[in-house]
Amino acid sequence: MTQLVALVLILAFGQAAPPPAEELFDAARRGDRARVAQLLDAGVDVNARARYDATALFFAADKGHLEVVRLLVERGADVNLLDTFYKFRAIDMARMNNHAEVVKYLVEHGSKLAAADTPPRAAAARAPIVVPPAVLQSYAGTYRNEDAGLTITVAATETALALTMPAQPPLTFTATAEHEFASAQAPNVLVTFTGRGGLIETLIVTQGATRFALQRAADVSAAAPTAEPPAGSKPADAPVTRAKPAPWPSFRGPNASGVADGQGAVAEWDVATGRNVKWKTPIPGIAVSSPIVWGDRVFVTTAIGKDADTTFRTGLYGDVKPVDDLSIHTWRVYAVDRRTGAVAWQRDVFTGSPKVKRHPKSSQASSTPATNGTHVVAIFGSVGLIACFDVNGKPLWQRNIGVVDNGWFFDPTYQWGHSSSPVIYGSSVIVQVDQQKGSFLAAFDLASGKPLWRTERPDEISTWGTPTVLRGPRGDELVTNGTKIRGYDPKTGKLLWTLGPNSEITVGTPVAGEGIVYVTGGYPPVRPVYAVKAGAAGDIALPKGQTANEAIAWSNDREGTYIPTPLLYRGVLYTLNSNGILTAYQANSGERLYRARVGGGGAFAASPIAADGRLYFANEDGDIVIAQAGAEYQELGTFATGEVIMATPAISDGLIIVRTLGHLYGIGQ
């Protein structure tokens, strides 16, 4: 029977090559033992490698499919193969998802235990191994577990590590295995270091049955200002004259700048008492898209689920499992009166089931709309639709671009949802659609929705940022963030330049000013900040060891930030990490001015904005922290909403518009 099955498969797939390994990976994820057996019989290598060398055994173990795991191991799957990104084995995937039977089976069949599972006394009894001083130095830093109130400082010597807790003497730890350390002073304690892409991110302390994971904290020691802002830039405390009303037409305002000088933004308010809160409007559904403003209209999008799973998790965590909710939703655009907060109109774009799941801190409506004062464009990736209305709510056109399937690069079944927002450029609207397969950049006629151009991005995987237009002497450039940063001609979609390396997951939007575009990535294998000059051409990657060239004004490869978009304001570049660490640089040179923690820390998804010499930071707990702009960090106040904030606020004509998960606030005098 097996020979007959193999013969049928050979006839079906041809003699030249076995069926693609991707089918084996998919069958292993589904737990389809019969299909896995068929593919192995047809000649697919049981140890065929996916991205970063994961195999079918990884995917079966991750999902807890014990019978498929058994089959793969019986057919020769390597139980101790390490992937090249996370440095995991299949057993680690099973452990993370609490598949105890799979873990037990893999141990019985030769899988090495993860270091954190090794009994501390057994580890301490091992002979020490020699670790190069440079490797030891890579573990040095401060690690925190905010929930447990635990902080550990790690210092490196030439041969060992010294771990110190507050009010405790340091303990000396020596290496007993790769990333694993034990101490003769505390033989029941084992410490291990883990990370992604070669970067150390987590310290795990195991003491008997107790296990703590501490996340590496950024260095927040405030450096003294090393230079003055560039000549000709406006001082941070320069007086601001109230200007005429200006729109906030897209994500983070004009060209994603995040700047609203002269718009009369207030610097204090009180939601509880209503002081300087002009209105508060409920918006149903779950959405993390940001508000936009033109004239007396505020536009927002949402997705309203019928009997939906409303699970939403804020905070700093690395979970990849999506919210498995494909219930009926209605995708809707709202127009709210800027003066009163009353709903001027609402339009339903589509009602049905989303085709992809969402991340637990994302939504089915994560993309911010865009307007030019006559047209309003919204994109809903989970149903593959772009919709355009006039500012009075009249439907103008709708375009199906195909469902956008964004998710984890390591396993595409972990879907996280789409968030890149449309960009109106002249008479066109441009969208960046980076997904698991079939990524592309496309432009449509703003008046009719007719396709204008489409540029395939075949080697790009899921991204979540919005393109930015860089103005330069040779013409405009459309800059996209991704595993490679690219510049395109926004009129034709022609590729102009590429830059790498970059992070494997990119979220932040590029920000442009003074002939330079700044791009950050805060996820391994590198965490860069690049300052790219207008007019670049070809491959502008830096040679190893260099931080600048003719196309790149400056860069570094370790300080890039993850989710929030950077802010360029009055000669200073501000980058905010998801953990609330703010770094300020001389925008023209990259010289660091300071590093500080915003507020009391916490998690930040919204991007910083600026107005009239002040910086505004909204955290996921619903607090908005205001600080003085400039070469030193000085907080001016913290103002609570009492609701989760994921969206970036907008500022226009005396009003700050704040979007929480439940409401839209108009804050102003």
Image (tube, grey):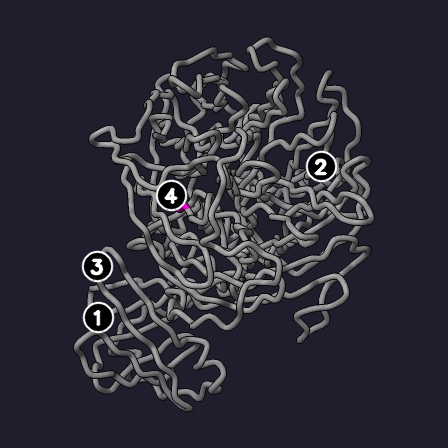
Task: Provide the secondary structure element on which disc 2 rests.
Answer: strand
Query: Residue at point 63% right, 60% down?
Result: 530
- Precedes in sequence: disc 3 or disc 4: 3
Query: Residue at point 46% right, 43% down?
Result: 611
Residue carrying label 2: 441
Out of 641 and 55, give the one closest to the viewer. 641
- Precedes in sequence: disc 2 or disc 3: 3
Q: Is residue 383 above or below residue 596?
A: above
Q: Is there any visible trace of residue 628 in the rendered image?
A: yes
Q: Is residue 381 above or below residue 55?
A: above
Out of 418 and 4, give the one closest to the viewer. 418
Out of 193 and 66, give the one closest to the viewer. 193
Residue 327 as seen in the image, left or right of residue 234: left
Q: Is residue 124 above or below residue 324?
A: below
Residue 25: which numbered mark, if any?
Answer: none
Disc 4 residue type (three-letter)? Ala
Whole-angstrom CA distance, mark 3 to mark 4, is 24 Å
Magenta residues span 616-620
Residue carrying label 4: 618
Q: Give yes or no for contact between labels 2 and 3 (Cβ–Cβ under 8 Å).
A: no
Whole-angstrom CA distance, mark 4 to mark 2, is 30 Å
Residue 207: which numbered mark, if any?
Answer: 1
Q: Nearer the viewer, mark 1 or mark 2?
A: 2
Query: Residue at point 41% right, 79% down?
Result: 177
| Quarter of the image that includes the N terminus | top right
